Image: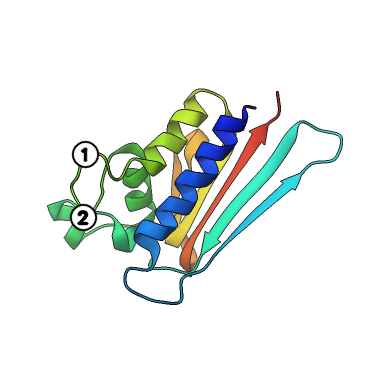
Amino acid sequence: MTTRAVFTTIMETMNNVREHAYGSRKNQGWWLMALPEKDTEIIHFSLADNGKGIPETIRKKFMEQIISKDADLIRAAVLENRSETKLYYRGNGLPKLKTLIDKKMIKNLYIISKKGYYYIDEDEVFQLPFEYHGTIIFWDFIKG
């Protein structure tokens, strides 16, 4: 694990919250947790907010505006630049996290937002039977 990879991941997730989660709402908040596993090389991280959620803030294609599931919208936000601003240099935070998975710098990257669940490592999506108001992102760093 490199310090740069840890820093990049934390900054990308925090920046996503700052840029997208709350809009003009004043009560912005987020929570970051880091938990090292004793006697292993793994550190678990999670970041949570109670903002609008990825399915609300992603730029949707025409058909997605009519029929879309939260889990599929989360997946689209990870695999493509789908920033509401349409600027090429925005909307790259979640895709950057995916590249860290591909480079094996992090693993077990999960995103829960609204009624959507996406496990990036296995490209697994499904709808939850409940709604989480905001977004939770989990990931593991492997030391060394």
Q: Report the residue at 71% width, 28% height from top.
A: 143
Distance of mark 2 from mark 1, alpha carbons?
21 Å
10 Å crowding of disc 1: few (<14), some (14-19), many (20+): few
Task: Check the image and report above or below for 53 versus 118.
Answer: below
Identity of the amino acid at label 1?
A: Tyr
Image quarter in which the N terminus is found: top right
Task: Check the image and report above or below for 23 versus 135.
Answer: below
* Disc ID at residue 88: 1
The colour mode here is rainbow
Q: Nearer the viewer, residue 144 or 138?
A: 144
Instruction: Residue 78 in the image: state x and y as whole percent.
Output: 37, 42
Image quarter in which the C terminus is found: top right
Q: Nearer the viewer, residue 22 or 69?
A: 22
Instruction: Residue 121 in the image: state x and y as whole percent.
Output: 51, 34
Instruction: Residue 62 in the image: state x and y as whole percent.
Output: 13, 54
Kindly indicate the quadrant of the structure image that contains residue 142: top right
Foreground mark, 2 or 1, reads 1
Task: Check the image and report above or below for 143 versus 7.
Answer: above
Q: Residue furthest right?
A: 39
Task: Give the structural element (helix, strand or loop) at label 1.
Answer: loop
- Residue under numbered circle 2: 64
Task: Give the structural element (helix, strand or loop) at label 2.
Answer: helix
Q: Report the residue at 64% width, 47% height from top.
A: 45
Kindly indicate the quadrant of the structure image that contains residue 65: bottom left
